[in-house]
Image (cartoon, rainbow, N blue to C red):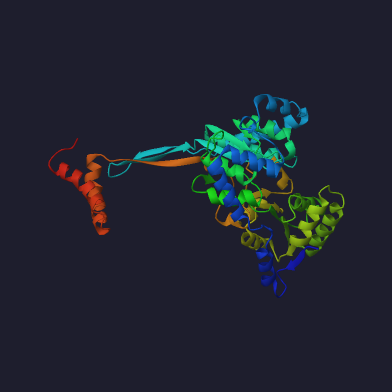
Amino acid sequence: MPVFLSTADQGFDAAFLALLSAKREDAPDVDAAVAAIIADVRARGDAAVIELTARFDRLELTPATLAFSADEIEAECARVSPEDRAALELAADRIRAYHARQVPEDQRWTDAAGAELGWRWGPVSAAGLYVPGGLASYPSSVLMNAIPAKVAGVERLVIACPTPGGVVNPLVLYAARLAGVDRVYRIGGAQAIAAMAYGTETIAPVDKITGPGNAYVAAAKRRVFGRVGIDMIAGPSEILVIADRDNDPDWIALDLLSQAEHDESAQSILVTDDAAFGRAVAAAVEARLGTLERRVIAGASWRDYGAVIVVRDLAEAAMLSDRVAPEHLELCVADPDALAAQVSHAGAIFLGHWTPEAIGDYVGGPNHVLPTARSARFSSGLSVMDFLKRTTIAKMTPGALAAIGPAAERLAISESLEAHGLSVRARLDRLNRGARA
């Protein structure tokens, strides 16, 4: 059974804190094993990747078969049904249109001192996307990772997607084609992260790695950060729904289960100002659980980490939501925009009864790669910005240097950095002798 809490009860704060601090991911300590894998890939390159793929994915490869060939991709894409093609194409178009609006503008201006200042934006040169493999892989994640990279202007885009036992999801390859991916490697795990970060004889290194994975992938991303950029370390999925009594309990139950079915460690929380409605939703969840294919996973998530919280009013609901800082926040209330204005921390917000979180996973347009484990307090979901770098620009005229140079020299002296000050002073002395060119 999920936890039932009420803010009116004594001991609520302690119970709520226990809910927030519950360890939801049984991640074994894999760091030592990952460190050994990375070292092996750095030392032996292709040979290490091929050996590890045979061991963990039961797939024998050669340097020539690490990546799917054009003919293989063509054959797999031909297996995609017209209906699935149309759905993926619609999703790709909407994701591309949304992310195109995120592209920032370069700026250049002259300030009061006469200095020309600004910045310019440019893409990373190469990015690698990790996609969990097998039949459980998600083509929607390919679109969500690859399309922002291409919109940003990334020149070379590759995917690492393991194919355990040689099992391929053709929708993943079709999504990669739609998104403009240049190459798809059939490797996974920490060895794939190491190969993309450091390169091998066959696999060229990238500058940024994004995408979710298991504990080994997460540990590898932590270890290669600094050599390459990474997006985030993703935890189990989570959803918080704020709903008043004027909702269909079955709709809200399905919204909660949409995240619970991801993972036994996922968390689904309902916050409502009506206790009877909360009980009705809980009953609807139990009824729906008996019908789901992934009932075992969803049932464990709801049983171990689910919660129904009754609040005095919606303002209190917004305050609790900010303490959770959920990955997904649904506002199923009469005036969702007004309530959203009271929320500061959420990965993504879904407004109103007709906006289920599942729309955001596929065709809404905004990215579904979002901060988890309360990290929405300080981070954002994946975007075009993750694949861009900002370079600042400064240009001094003689007059500008004369105006602000003495202050720079003074600060350099105060920090005992003699050459800093002298590099400015040499130019100021030239100006003082009358040279303005």
Q: Is residue 16 visible?
A: yes
- Please determine whether, in this image, residue 310 is positioned above or below residue 427: below
Q: Quadrant of residue 368?
A: top right
Q: Quadrant of residue 30?
A: bottom right
Residue at 66% x, 36% y: name it.
186
- Residue sitting at the far bottom: 10
> Left of 208 or right of it: where is 5?
right
- Please determine whether, in this image, residue 61 is positioned above or below residue 407: above
Please provide percent x and percent y for residue 117: 35, 41
Q: Quadrant of residue 28?
A: bottom right
Quadrant location, the N terminus: bottom right
Query: Could you say which is closer to the camera, residue 384 or residue 34?
Result: 34
Quadrant location, the C terminus: top left
Query: Could you say which is closer to the camera, residue 200 or residue 125?
Result: 200
Please provide percent x and percent y for residue 53: 66, 41
Q: Is residue 247 visible?
A: no
Please provide percent x and percent y for residue 235: 65, 53
Query: Could you say which is closer to the camera, residue 132 or residue 335?
Result: 132
Query: Could you say which is closer to the camera, residue 70 or residue 353?
Result: 70
Please provide percent x and percent y for residue 264: 75, 55
State the count of labels. 0
